Structures are given as C-alpha cells and as structure tokens.
Amino acid sequence: MQRREFVGGLATSWLAGGAATLDIASAQSAWPSKTITIIVPFPPGGQGDLAARPIAEYLQRALGRAAIVENRGGAGGKTGNAAAARAEPDGHTLLVTLSSLAVLPEADRIWERPVAYEVGDLAPVARILADPTLLAVSASAPWKTLGEFIEDAKKDPGSIAYGSSGPYGTLHVAMEMFAAEAGIKLLHVPFTGAGPALAAVLQGSCKALASAPGVLKPQADAGAVRVLANWGAERVPTFPDVKTFRELGFPNVEFYIWGGLFAPKATPAPVIARLREEVRKAMADPAIIRIFEGAGSPPAWLDAPDFQKFIAVDSARLIAAVKKIGKVE
C-alpha cells in the first residue's frame, strides 16, 4: 500500500470514528429534550406505583426535565406494557412494570389470541423492587390461619372470592398457583390493578387477595386486613410472624412481585447508559431508600445485565406455572 493511500484510509477511519463519537455525544447532550413519561400499566395504589414514583421524582431532579408517571391500567398490565413497547424509542417514554411482563404474552398464546407484545420489545434498565407476595384476607373474614382458609374453600368450592389485577396478572397467577397446590377452587374477580382489588377486600366484596408487603402493610397495621401466608422463600422482615407457604407444607408455592424500569428496545445506547447510571444513583440515595423501606418494600436494585439474567430465570418459572394453570377466566 502506498503511504498516501494508507494515510487517506487512516483519515477516513478516524473521521468515521469521530463522527460516531460525536453522534453519541449528541445523543447524550440532546436527551432529554422534553417531558419523560413513565408508564405504569396499573391503576394507582399498587406495587408498580410504589416503584415508579420515587424514581420519577429523582430523574426529574437529576435530568432537569419533568418526569411524570402515567397510570395506564387494563388487561392485567398488558395494555400499558404494549403501549410502552410501541412507543417512540427516544428515551422519553419509559415503563415501570411487574413480573407479569413475561406471563401476559404466554397467556395470549394459550388463548390463541394475537400477542400484544413480546418481552424482547423492551430493554431492561434496572430492577427496583422485588418482594415476595403475601396472602391477605379481610379483617371481617373468619379465617385466622391458612388451614382454616383452605378448609372452608374445600367445603364450598368457588365460594371464596379473591381480587386480582386482571387475568394472568401477578396477583392472579400467585393465587392460582396456591389453589392448584392446595387442591381448592376459588372465585377469581379481576380488577384493573392491585389498588382496586385491595379496595374490594377492604369494602368486603372480595375476601382475599395476593399483594406485595408494601401495599399491605398500612392496611395490616390499621387492622383492616389479616395476612395468612407468604409466597417467598423466607419470612418478610415487616411481617416476621407470617409463615411461608414452604413452612406451611407447600414447597412449590413461590412467587415474587418485582418492579423494574424498561425502555423500548431501540432506545439509543447512550440514553440507556445514562438511565442506568441515574437509577443506580437513585437507588443509593438515602431519601429514596427511606421511602421504599418506609413502605415496607426495601430496594432490590439490579443493573441491566444482571436484571436481564434475573428476568430470564424468573420468567421461565412463571411461564411454566401459567402453562400448568392453562385457560382460566
């Protein structure tokens, strides 16, 4: 190769690399250019809200742009998840969703419906919370123990109504896993989210639900609900006297409600990197930690690579459970 050709090629390569660097720098400096919307695919009052709102407030302070939470409930979370997956991948529409993320596309396949979205349509940014689910009943209900609950359910199949966030949502799958293992039939009453389902229990139109510790703690402290069992592998610090299903003789009944931040999959890498860094700092902020711990849901941060691995393992277990459950209303 002649020296002039070599120098010319080197210059071309340098210019291309420099242009790429400038593109990255431009993407970093230009974002955010408008309000950031964080979709929560459930109504206010549930675990999705608890995970999203402190993060939105932190991002607003850190990035100098408004960051709002938009509750877009429906279909157990599918409506909001699909909206985020289809959003413009410019970093201005994000999603905080729950562990039902992988379950809902599988439910569509079970029912031979068009699949609203795929998990791969979304890029994980960070896990925020990861709580075991708890079984709660109305304080007016007669059951003081899980054994009493199961005994009554066996006497009169389908008589005990429980609320959920919708078919195949986190609360529904958890309850059906338990019912299948216990050999009982419960009456499923779907709502648009955990908040309305909890309200139904408080009002007495439903007698039970599965929900996260942070959602249930204020109601349990007030004496409005009674917590009978824990879907986790270990007892929850905020409910130390509540036994796990494993302790109660159901070793295969295990379920967690995690909350994580996602972006549409084609969101520019520099934007994802900035989001990861800001969420990392948010989850180490003492004020944010106090908010989560005060709500009974301690931070459970995982950065994108580890969160991706976690999702793969958790989703495989949940999809297997949904296939076992099959078609349910």
Image (spheres, grey):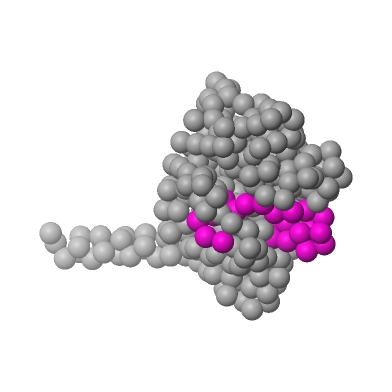
Q: Is residue 199 above or below residue 326?
A: below
Residue farthest top in this picture: 112
Residues in magenta, as a range = 214-235
The residue shown at (71%, 66%) is 295
Horizontally, residue 157 falls left or right of residue 316, namely right
Quadrant for the C terminus in the image? top right
Residue at image point 87% right, 45% down: 203
Picture quadrant of residue 26 = bottom right
The reply to whether residue 301 is visible in this rendering is yes
- Say whether residue 198 is magenta: no
Q: Number of callouts in the render?
A: 0
Question: Closer to the camera, 327 or 90?
Answer: 327
Residue at the bottom extreme, as displayed: 286
| Left or right of 214, for residue 267 | left
Where is residue 155? Give x, y as percent.
69, 30
Report the front residue among 191 and 163.
163
Q: Nearer the viewer, residue 82 or 195?
A: 195
Percent position of residue 201, x then y: 80, 45
Residue drawn at 56 percent across, 61 percent down: 235
Q: Quadrant of the N terminus?
A: bottom left
Q: Name the outermost residue toward the right.
A: 203
> Can residue 221 be found in the magenta stretch?
yes
Give residue 58's position: percent from left, percent from top: 68, 69
